[in-house]
Amino acid sequence: MSRSRRASTAALLACLLLACAPAAVTQTPATPTRLLVKPRAGVTLEQLDAILERHGARRVGVIEQINVYLCEPRLGVEAGALARSLQAEPGIEFVEFDQRVPPASDRRAQ
């Protein structure tokens, strides 16, 4: 096999592996640890940070359009317990796990 043919074959295999990699990643079930947290109207960012700190979490991002914050538990804090304790806070409107959800058309087929 010539050098150029081997290089072409290697390039083709690399492309195929890269094309298949995202499918493998999205099919792997993962335990969500990031939370989506929406404070109630009137709760300041400082108040939200205090609530999160009390429960062992920290802000890592924001979805500004809908006033929802991406939060992660601190080391040693279990995400499920964190979600439950934050949901009980009067200043929190809702808490959800940050995870991919299939479109409604895919869910009906299950």
Image: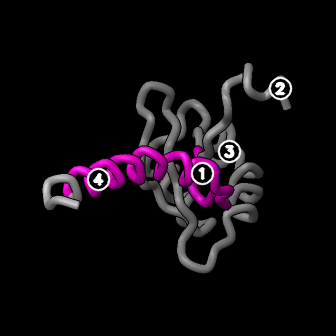
Residue hosting label 4: 9
Q: CA distance from mark 1 to mark 3?
A: 6 Å
* Residue at which label 1 appears: 35
The mark closer to the camera, 2 or 3, is 2
| 39 is higher (above) or lower (below) than 60 | above
Instruction: Give the residue furthest to the front.
Output: 1
Q: Amino acid at mark 2?
A: Ala
Q: Amino acid at mark 1?
A: Leu
Residue 60, given in percent of the width and then of the height, sits at: 42, 55
**Would residue 66 be found to the left or right of residue 99 on screen?**
left
Mark 3 residue type: Glu
Contact check, label 1 and label 2, Cβ < 8 Å: no
User: Residue 97: where, in percent of width, then height?
Assistant: 66, 48
Q: Which residue is mark 2?
A: 109
Report, in whole angstroms, how far the alpha carbon at label 1 lies from the one at label 4.
44 Å
In the rendered image of this protein, does residue 98 appear above or below residue 101?
below
Please state which of the two labelled residues, at mark 1 or mark 4, is closer to the viewer.
4
* Amino acid type of the residue that numbered disc 4 sits on in the rendered structure: Thr
Instruction: Kindly indicate whether the residue at mark 3 contacts the one at mark 2 (C-beta within 8 angstroms).
Output: no
> What distance separates the C-alpha of mark 2 from that of mark 4?
39 Å
| Residue labelled with disc 3 | 96
